[in-house]
């Protein structure tokens, strides 16, 4: 108002018009923002219990636009996350931090090219050496392997393992072997230093161990060439299998499918069957019988694959049992040479809308379905599981009785880097080895979009926001605007960040040769678990 009093009449009119325009702009860009169309909206099953919670929106990119799939509340950094396992069969130096120790400070560590390390020890009277501590990783469980150091240099060094805050244990001399210096400590011995481990309820501080080089008391030098977990194969190579979701492949060109499977070295195919919703007989029974007989003549076993998230619910469970009875009738109506080898259940109930609202209950219902199917099935059963199941709220319910309901399990270890595939598969491989359940490891080559994860923080009360959650009959709606707006009701949030998970980290994206080669390269490491039974490939035929 002071400014207006200093202006002449025309100036006052101009200033007044400008102020009216600015006030109108603020009014219509905030209070009236409810009339704007959101960029996207999504139904949600519940509202946050506290308006101050941080939330996360998950989705994918479709046609250069973000397509949301779910909203998660109360996102916090987990204090119980179990670190990934160190990989077998490759150098661990990139996973290790290095620190000299000793009160006399007589040890110097020099890093050279290709991660090689030189340890120079001066003479002294006190224990000294170097600690190699895994960074954001831990020792694997259930595998047969040796913790090996390869080096060159002087004699007198020792190789050991140090529990957190304690002196080195399991010391062995670094001795001459095949022209180099080497020392091995079996993973079984290392396991005696680790706390008890349960896949269903893993402890966040499992296997906090360091590897240790102890210097001799005299002057000496050692060049570390590698530190590695060398796998000791205890399981056979296992079979190679693939999914065939498109029934036309075996209905219209069974001979071609069998020939392709033979060239790829496959010994099992999981095929989708056509069973009427009413629970009648399997459709195309004669063609199915002929296809199975043809495949068996070429040493390829055929299993049915059944998959529907609704099978975890009571109504879907009844439907699953009806389909099971139809498959039983087929088995009884054909000769042994035309019978299925088993049934694989790829249910994936975490895709249900209700999962995020109550994952424990979803897990309980899923476990009940598996128990009912196992009780009534006359065929072998394989259960498909996501690799992250052991860290999910469903773990206790599902894994608790799985060893009694499943003849085998298949891990969807959908990653493309070999060390990461090992890391994501390790918890269930360990579980299978402890429970005596065969475990198959599956890889993906199908088309997938990039995943996007958007994080939001609560906006101040009465302030504009880009994301609004509105209550609606006990549930809610999420609305995302392209700029901050102010709504009269609801909880407002502002975007805090976005992370893109490239599809190439999850799927080989049609590069089937690369997927098959990765499967072959993984064999040496995966066979270190007694439970390992083979590889399954998705995207070879569909």
Image (cartoon, rainbow, N blue to C red):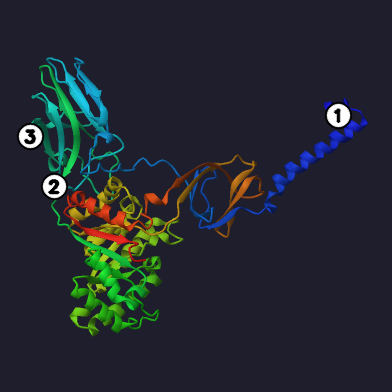
| Foreground disc of the pair 2, 3 | 3
Q: Which x, y percent locates residue 474?
A: 55, 58
Furthest residue toward right: 9
Q: Nearer the viewer, residue 264 or 344?
A: 264
Q: Residue under circle 1?
A: 4
The Cα–Cα distance between marks 2 and 3, rounded to whole angstroms, is 18 Å
- At horizontal 18% and vertical 20% (from top left) the residue drawn is 120
Figure check: 414 above or below 165: below
In the image shown, does 432 or 304 lie closer to the viewer?
304
Q: How many marks?
A: 3
Say left or right for 492 vs 360: right
Residue beneath disc 3:
177
**In this view of the protein, can residue 227 be seen by the observer?**
yes
Quarter of image, res 476: bottom right
Q: Secondary structure at mark 2?
A: loop
In the displayed structure, would residue 328 be above or below residue 215? below
Q: Locate the C terminus by quadrant.
A: bottom left
Residue 229: x and y, percent?
A: 18, 41
Name the residue located 34 percent from the left edge and 42 percent from the top edge.
80
| Label ID, residue 210 | none
How far, Cα to Cα, is label 3 from label 1?
93 Å
Among the two numbered marks 3 and 1 on one chain, the one whose residue lies closer to the N terminus: 1
Sequence-first disc among 2 and 3: 3
Q: What kind of element bears circle 1?
A: helix
**Inter-mark Cα distance, 1 to 2:** 87 Å
Q: Pointer 2: what residue?
A: 232
User: How many residues crowd around disc 3 within 10 Å: few (fewer than 14), some, or many (20 or more)?
Assistant: few
């Amino acid at each position: 108002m002071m400014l207006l009093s200093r202006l002449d009449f025309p100036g006052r009119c101009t200033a007044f018009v400008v102020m009216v325009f600015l006030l109108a702009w603020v009014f219509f860009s905030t209070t009236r923002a409810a009339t704007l169309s959101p960029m996207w909206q999504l139904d949600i099953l519940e509202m946050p219990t506290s308006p101050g919670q941080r939330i996360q929106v998950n989705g994918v990119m479709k046609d250069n636009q973000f397509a949301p799939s779910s909203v998660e509340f109360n996102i916090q950094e987990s204090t119980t996350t179990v670190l990934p396992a160190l990989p077998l069969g490759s150098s661990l130096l990139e996973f290790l931090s290095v620190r000299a120790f000793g009160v006399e400070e007589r040890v110097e560590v020099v890093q050279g090219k290709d991660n090689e390390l030189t340890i120079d020890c001066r003479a002294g009277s006190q224990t000294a050496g170097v600690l190699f501590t895994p960074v954001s990783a831990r020792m694997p469980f259930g595998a047969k392997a040796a913790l090996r150091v390869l080096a060159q240099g002087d004699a007198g060094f020792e190789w050991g393992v140090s529990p957190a805050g304690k002196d080195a244990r399991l010391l062995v001399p670094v001795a001459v072997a095949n022209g180099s210096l080497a020392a091995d400590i079996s993973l079984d011995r290392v396991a005696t230093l680790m706390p008890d481990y349960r896949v269903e309820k893993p402890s966040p501080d499992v296997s906090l161990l360091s590897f240790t080089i102890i210097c001799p008391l005299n002057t000496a030098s050692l060049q570390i060439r590698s530190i590695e977990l060398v796998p000791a194969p205890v399981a056979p190579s296992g079979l190679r299998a693939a999914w065939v979701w498109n029934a036309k492949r075996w209905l219209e060109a069974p001979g071609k499918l069998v020939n392709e499977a033979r060239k790829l070295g496959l010994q099992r195919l999981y095929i989708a069957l056509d069973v009427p919703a009413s629970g009648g007989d399997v459709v195309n029974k004669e063609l199915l019988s002929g296809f199975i007989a043809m495949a068996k003549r070429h040493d390829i076993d055929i299993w049915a694959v059944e998959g529907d998230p609704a099978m975890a619910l009571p109504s879907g469970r009844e439907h699953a049992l009806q389909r099971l009875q139809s498959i039983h009738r087929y088995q009884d109506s054909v000769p042994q040479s035309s019978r299925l080898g088993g049934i694989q259940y790829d249910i994936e109930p975490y895709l249900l809308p209700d999962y995020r609202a109550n994952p424990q209950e979803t897990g309980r219902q899923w476990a009940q379905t598996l128990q009912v199917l196992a009780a009534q099935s006359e065929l072998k059963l394989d259960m498909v599981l996501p690799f992250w199941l052991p860290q999910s709220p469903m773990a206790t319910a599902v894994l608790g009785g799985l060893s009694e309901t499943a003849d085998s399990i298949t891990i969807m270890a959908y990653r493309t880097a070999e060390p990461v595939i090992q890391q994501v598969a390790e918890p269930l491989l360990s579980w299978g080895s402890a429970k005596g359940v065969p475990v198959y490891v599956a890889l993906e080559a199908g088309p997938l979009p990039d995943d996007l994860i958007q994080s939001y923080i609560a906006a101040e009360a009465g302030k504009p926001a880009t994301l609004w959650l509105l209550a609606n009959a006990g549930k809610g709606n999420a609305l995302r605007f392209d700029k901050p707006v102010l709504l009269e009701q609801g909880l407002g949030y502002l975007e805090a960040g976005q992370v893109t998970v490239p599809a190439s980290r999850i799927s080989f994206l049609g590069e089937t040769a690369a997927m098959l080669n990765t499967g072959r390269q993984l064999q040496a490491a995966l066979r270190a678990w007694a439970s390992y039974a083979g590889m399954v490939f998705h995207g070879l035929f569909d």
